[in-house]
Image (spheres, rainbow, N blue to C red):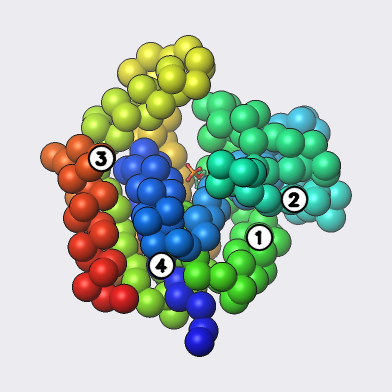
Amino acid sequence: MDPVSIAIDGPSGAGKSTLARMIAKELGFLYVDTGALYRTVGLYTLRQGVDTKDPEGVAVLLPDIRIGMRYDDGGVQRMDLNGEDVTDLIRTPEVSMAASHVSAIPAVRAFLLDTQRELARRHNVIMDGRDIGTVVLPEAKIKIFLTASAAERARRRCRELREKGIETDLPSVLRDIEQRDRNDSSRAVAPLRPAPDAVMCDTTEHDLDASLALLLQIIRERL
Ligand code: DC
């Protein structure tokens, strides 16, 4: 039987990764966080001192980037950049913005496409990102577009960053989220938008447990 794919797209901070990880565990699927791939390219670009908005400058770097993805014993997706574990380093606000910039560059999207599709060819996956239902896996069996208000997403992201020991404040997190929403939705290639056949889910009013129950219900009805 062909592997089953579930696509979860939506803006940053909507709860995609937390929920997708929990659903993957529940269903025994592989969870793939595709944002981590763009973040890894963003980190490399920053380290090379190249402008993350410069398409030619970033494209020249791509042949030197080897991205490794593996899962540790706890099922956490770990990212390697040219042999170095960068799992924690790619979570800073600076790398978030760099990822948003490099992800608008067509050569970067092409560079990461096969890695994502190959995983879906080999495993039952639940993959989260911005263009999974529209570009990466248009044939996904289930597509969910997860949103929440920008204010609520900023509150959640702020809490998450503080839990990781990254000092931050709500207004700057909200500003970053709104800026990334604009970048990710307005770019020419693979912009953030729901696939025509995606189920729309707004979690502004739902806590984590309620959101999880809602998504599991949607998925089980369709599997
Ligand atoms: O999901 P995230 O916040 O970790 O993603 C970081 C950035 O990567 C995000 O601003 C947009 C980009 N991205 C993308 O363009 N396509 C994806 N499938 C996943 C992420």
User: In terms of depth relative to the viewer, which is nearer, 105 or 205?
Assistant: 205
Residue drawn at (80%, 51%) of the image? 66
Q: Residues within 10 Å of mark 4 (few under 14, many from 20)?
A: many
Instruction: Give the residue type that dot 1 points to.
Output: Leu
Q: Identify the disc placed on residue 208.
A: 3
Is 144 placed left or right of 129 in the picture?
left
> Which residue extends farthest right?
64
> Which residue extends farthest front?
73
Is label 2 in a helix, a strand or a loop?
A: strand
Name the N-terminal-most of marks 1 and 4: 4
Choose top left, top right, bottom left or bottom right for residue 114: bottom right
| Residue 42: image location, x then y, percent | 65, 40
Q: Is residue 36 visible?
A: no
Q: Is residue 66 visible?
A: yes
Choose top left, top right, bottom left or bottom right for residue 74: top right
Q: Using the numbered discs, state the Cα–Cα distance from disc 2 to disc 1 in whole angstroms.
A: 9 Å
Residue receiving disc 2:
67
Residue drawn at (85%, 49%) of the image? 64
Name the N-terminal-most of marks 4 and 3: 4
Residue receiving disc 4:
6
Instruction: Give the residue type that dot 3 points to.
Output: Leu
Residue drawn at (29%, 26%) of the image? 155
Q: Nearer the viewer, mark 3 or mark 2?
A: 3
Is 28 placed left or right of 79 in the picture?
left
| Residue 208: image location, x then y, percent | 25, 40
Q: Nearer the viewer, mark 1 or mark 4?
A: 4
Q: Using the numbered discs, state the Cα–Cα distance from disc 1 to disc 4 in whole angstroms.
A: 18 Å
Residue receiving disc 1:
112
Choose top left, top right, bottom left or bottom right for residue 120: bottom right
Name the N-terminal-most of marks 4 and 2: 4
Instruction: Give the residue type that dot 2 points to.
Output: Ile
Is 201 placed left or right of 68 in the picture?
left
